[in-house]
Image (tube, grey):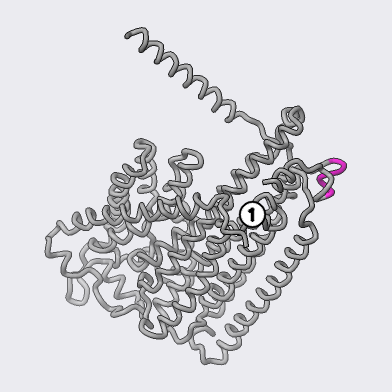
Amino acid sequence: MAQAQAVQNAPRSSGDGSMTTGNPANPTDWSVGWHPLFWGCGLIMLANVFFWYWNYAFMFTAGLNSASAEFTMYYWTLFWGELIVLGVFSGVWLGWLIRNGRAIEGQECSPAEETRRIAILWSLIGATSLAIYLMASFWPNWDGSWHQTMVRDTAFTPTHIPMFYFFFPLSVILAVGTYIYGRFHIPALYGKDKGFPWSFFLLIGACVLECMAVAANEWGHSLWISEEIFSVPFHWPFVIYGWLAAGMFAVWGETLVRMFEVEKAEEDANPEASLESPIAAD
Amino acid sequence: MATETTTVTDLAEAAERQRRLELKELLNKKYKWIDWKWDLVFWTTAIFVVAGAADITKQLFAGDWDFWTDWKDPQWWPVVTAFATIIIPSTLQYIQWAAWRFPTGATYTACCLFFAAWVGRYFQWDLAATYPMNFVWPASVVCAGILMDWTLMKTKSFILTSLIGAHVWAIAVWAYNYVPLAAFLQPAHFMDHVVTVADVQGIAYIRSQTPEYLRLIERGALRSFLGETQYVSLAFAGTAAFVGYWIGQFIGRYLAVWPIRRYLKTV
């Protein structure tokens, strides 16, 4: 609580310099606090369009027989390429978040800066939401249409490779990265003295358990159900683990409550300015 | 006695007026940084996680009955679809009612699911796997969502909504989707058998990885009650939807709202 008050009452001399000196930008301008939303969703959709095109082009010409040379060329290459891209991305991004976070840990930030950081957290959550849609709806539809018509001869099918080995781990990386961002940049909510938030515990848990369910699913298909019925009970863990992603609403809820606290602190500290310029224009 | 009653009434009216003024002041309150962008970002980005959750719940609890026209039978389809599709709408109904007193959560989810299901069926089942859309169209729950939200708005009670709204949901899901389905239930003479048009689709468009794929989905028990089985199924679908409604409430209450600002023990 003391930390929260310290953040609320902090002078406007720290954080992003562009917002604390000269002509201050509105922290909630589209190009300030929200820009990671557009970048994040844009990159995710770009990756999705790439996989979409790849499968349209090659799934029936190279994806039917996992023992063929074409499969090795088009799908094993894709699989290893995904893992390398995700490995590099997670190492660079998560490493950058931790390094950058440690550099600012303990520093006070202005209400405007905290507002910007909450907008960035919402942007990252928005990108995570898009990744969850792709892993829970877009690709499972394709997996259904593939499995109910094609013979299953591998756990690494043309639909599994983008879904299970790209979008599933991507959602884990995004959820973990969003928490790390909050952990260092929004200490009033996610500082280490608070403990681990249930909201992120559920959200990250949903994404991690979905990945673990892949192993159980493929084991089940190799053992006793090689045919495809989408509503068989051993598919149900995917659903139940997915429900844990409701923790995302708790992230939205607690950050919004925090925004009202920031507004209240700003209003108390500078009541006349609050009334004069209620909402800055873009 | 009359004076006392009048005084109490006046006091209640004054308190009500005061409350309205406070709410109006809150409504018109200007914030420095909280503006319409937060609303826009929330309602837009939430579409994806809601659509994903609703669609994966439908696909893996009732998917087979929803994927194909010939699986949309009078016995299982109304029951499993009503159960599987009400869960996430109930969750959002709780969240939106608790947060804003908006009776819109079920309709919002139904629209998200409509978007996700049609994207999936068109791009993945029709374009990629070349099944015609009139064989793989998804059931819609938009009408059911509107009616269940209306039930909550009028009753202001989750218990009454679960008792009334869940049964309304089951009936509405069946009735709303029976309209597009009816054309595929017309009789056809096919290979010396009288079958439905949907059965012909199921035989013509091969699903080679489903068990006993050359079979008629609709089976004997449906005919044993003559035409009544449909209504028995709908009554049971209401019961199943009631259970699904409270599963959704659990998700909304304990996985979405309860965790707000709660922390695991500090390590």
Quadrant of the rendered structure where residue A161 is?
Answer: bottom right
The residue positioned 78% from the left and 49% from the top of the image is: A108
Residue A49 visible in image:
no
Q: Which residue lies under the disc numbered 1? A: A194
- Image point 27% across, 50% down: which residue? B171
Residue B81 on image: x %, y %: 33, 59
Image quadrant in which the C terminus of chain A is located = top right
Give residue B180's position: percent from left, percent from top.
32, 56
Local crowd at mark 1 within 10 Å, few (<14), some, or many (≥20)?
A: many
Q: Nearer the viewer, residue B60 or B156?
A: B156
Looking at the rendering, which quadrant does residue A230 occupy?
Answer: bottom left
Q: Depth check: A183 or B87 in front? A: A183
Q: Position of residue A207 (x, y in %)?
A: 54, 66
Q: Chain of mark 1?
A: A
Mark 1: which secondary structure? helix
From what the image shows, is residue B207 above or below residue A241? below
| Kind of residue at disc 1 | Lys
Tell me if residue B19 comes above or below residue A20 in the rendering: above
* Residue B214 location (% of width, % of height): 28, 78
Q: Is residue B43 above or below residue B230?
A: above
Give, as a single range, the part of the protein colored magenta: A17-23
Indicate whether residue B17 is drawn in magenta: no
Q: Is residue A103 above or below residue B100?
A: below
Taking B147 as reference, is A73 left or right? right
